[in-house]
Amino acid sequence: MRINGVLPGVISALALGMAMAMPAHAQEPIKVGLLEDVSGDLALMGMPKLHGAELAVEEINNSGGIMGRQIELIHLDPQGDNARYQEFARRLLSRDKVDVLIGGITSASREAVRPIIDRTDTLYIYTNQYEGGVCDASMISNGAVPEQQLSTLVPYMVEHFGKKVYVVAADYNFGHLTTEWTEKLLADAGGEVIGKEFIPLGVSQFAQTIQNIQKADPDWLMMLNVGAAQDSFFEQAMAADVHYPMASPIKVMLGFEHKRFAPPALSGLKAVANWYEELDTPEAEDFKKRWHAKYPDEPYINDMGYNAYVALYQYKMLVEKAQSTELEPIREVIATGEACVDSPEGEICIDPKSQHTSHRMRLVSVKDDHTVETLHDFGVIEPYWLGEIGCDLTKENPQTQYSPDNLPG
């Protein structure tokens, strides 16, 4: 007998084929493109980022994946070269067809990638502390920004050490824009930058800089130097018997200099961080235990590695709430104001206007023996600055980076 002209056996075969094909399609992996420097001058900071992403992928896959789909992690190493960042971003997007792009260390690498992402419908998650200001619907930032770090750190330093500041900064957009933020916040507090130097990446000799600092005789130093070479400053200053109070939004938490250099090279340095390995809450202790079980030789779980780990869980939350890997449904979830995840620092949420992340911020200090103590818990600080100056990605998408000297309209 035929049913609508088709033999029953054929129907059974078709039904069996569809039943077999549907789960296969449902199990196609979600592709995550990861751009992280694990060789070159920035490798010591980038390797924990790779490890954080790998740990999160392993945990998520072992617990059933995202909407029942496993994650396929595709990592490329740009070696700190911005041209490679662009080349590899294009490769991941066009050849590998990744569902999301994650990573980048320097702000220069982020700005090299962002125009490429903006021409696609792919989400990009930038996983570093940075100078803030990017208002772009294609990007989520999950690292700390100036209103979470500098707005707390600079007033503390002025109150406790004085108003005259010397800045040592890396010579690219992070260094320049963070110096701009420092100058603004100092002016608000009645202080001033009495000297500033912008050092090219890779420079490791600081004799002249140290002499310039001694001549200026500031109350404290703002350290915005980046990379293994520039961190040579600390040993050279100690050898020259130059000791000034220091502050930084990146030291300890990113480059774990207090672990890499002998005491007391970083003695007294103050930083404001959302993550540092010395954090001893129950959630942080559990996270560290799982991390070191997988990577027993990791010298330090830095903020970048932590952010990379959290980024995968943020992405999982967004995709599952949106029931889609597409950018627009994900942005609709963010627009609700309920895009939150539990993390080793506590609950963190993505701000709908800026697509930046709230963080629980703490003031830390490096002691003479290079152990780290927590001086103050500021609680959860929202990434409020972009929203205050008019960035609202629920209404428009300027794809622009703002700063205190470059405001909208």
Image (spheres, helix red, strand yellow):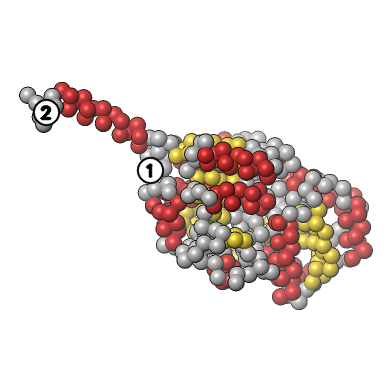
* Type of the residue with mark 1: Met
Closer to viewer: mark 1 or mark 2: 2
At a point 60% along the width and 39% down the height, the residue shown is: 88
Residue 219: x percent and y percent? Answer: 83, 67
Q: Position of residue 244 (x, y in %)?
A: 84, 61
State the image coordinates of residue 154 (x, y, percent, origin top left).
71, 67
Give the left or right position of residue 177, taking residue 213 as reference: left
Q: Where is residue 184 in the image (x, y as percent from the top left)?
A: 71, 71
Q: From the image, which quarter does the C terminus lie in?
A: bottom right
The residue to which callout 2 is attached is 5
* Mark 2 neighbour density, 10 Å: few (under 14) some (14–19) many (20 or more): few
Q: Residues within 10 Å of mark 1 (few under 14, many from 20)?
A: some
What residue sits 74% from the left and 60% below the top?
Answer: 176
Q: What element carries label 1?
A: loop
> Which quadrant of the rendered structure holds the N terminus?
top left
Quarter of the image for residue 61 reads: top left
Res 197 seen here: yes
Classify residue 308 as left or right of residue 78: left
Query: In 3D space, how far apart are the residues under numbered discs 1 and 2 (Cα atoms)?
Result: 38 Å
Going by the numbered disc 2, the residue's amino acid type is: Gly
Does residue 376 appear in the picture of this structure?
Answer: no
Q: Is mark 2 on a helix, strand or loop?
A: loop
Examine the image and state in which quarter residue 33 appears: top right
Count the labels in the image: 2
Mark linked to residue 67: 1
Identify the residue shown where x is 79% and y is 45%: 202
